[in-house]
Image (spheres, rainbow, N blue to C red):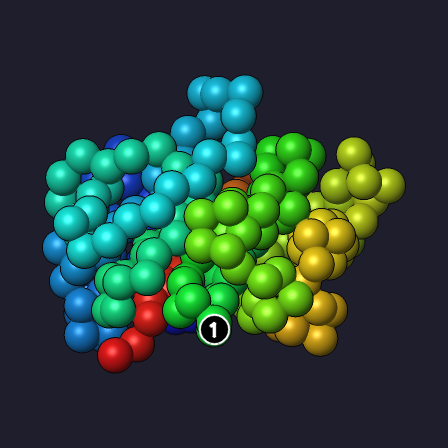
Amino acid sequence: MYTSTVSDGTMKRGDEPSIADRNRAKFLQSLDKKPNDAVLVQLDYNSDDFCRYTVVDTSAAGEGMTRAGRIADGIATQSVGLALFLPLADCIGAVLYDPDHEVLMLTHLGRHNLEQDGGVKSVEFLVQQFGTNSSRLEVVFSPSAGKENYPLFAFDGKSLADVATAQLMTAGVSRSAIKHSPYDTTTDQNYFSHSEFLKGNRETDGRFAIVAMIDP
């Protein structure tokens, strides 16, 4: 997993999308990739379903980056070198890897997803689509908001990482196979934080990005 920081600029396509497009292209270039080599995990909050998953291959390259994409909360692929791209600003981007079937999934685990058991459903999707053995999965979490500044009230004040870990373990993932990020987006100025922006503690409501791919 590769993670941008504030120094790479915002990855949010807001009022000035051309700025985000340039920043995305530059970040991908640092990974020897172009926007046409990537697929965006394109979220949509105007929905009641936050557990939408899809499988992509190289034919999807450029979706959401240089051409229209599909709405999804998580994307899985077996295509080597295809970059899965997810902008974030507090939520968890979780990378799940199945070494037996060489499948990579990048899934969004924010409050909305977790309240619908997104951790469990992400694993179930891999099991259904690829025959994944959940006990063999390897998982890495992106930087995310900690419970001190972003408690999940639907889960007794636990953190995003705590809830996501519990859900993945319920689905059969080994605790030792889940790698947490040491960085809290609400306190680490190297990462954008939407929640801190809303509180008036940050001047910019930006997004950092994570990229995941199966290396050649």
Image point (59%, 42%), residue name = 121
SS at mark 1? loop
Crowding around mark 1 (Cα neighbors within 10 Å: few <14, some 14 to 19, many 20+) is few
Question: Can residue 4 be seen?
Answer: no
Question: Can residue 127 be seen?
Answer: yes
Residue found farthest to the right: 156
Q: Give the left or right position of residue 140, taking residue 209 as reference.
A: right
**Which sits in the foreground, 12 or 198?**
12
Vertical placement of 210 versus 177: above or below? above
Residue found farthest to the front: 131
For the C terminus, the image quarter is bottom left
Q: Give the left or right position of residue 172, taking residue 20 as reference.
A: right
For the N terminus, the image quarter is bottom left
Image point (69%, 52%), residue name = 171
Residue 17 place in picture, x, y as percent:
21, 40
Image point (51%, 46%), residue name = 128
Of the residues shown, which amino acid type is indicated by label 1?
Pro
Image point (33%, 67%), residue name = 213
Residue 83 place in picture, x, y as percent:
28, 61
Q: Quadrant of residue 35?
A: bottom left
The residue wearing badge 1 is 99
Vertical placement of 46 versus 29: above or below? above
Residue 110 place in picture, x, y as percent:
59, 43
**Which sits in the foreground, 26 or 142?**
142
Residue found farthest to the bottom: 216
Q: Quadrant of residue 34?
A: bottom left
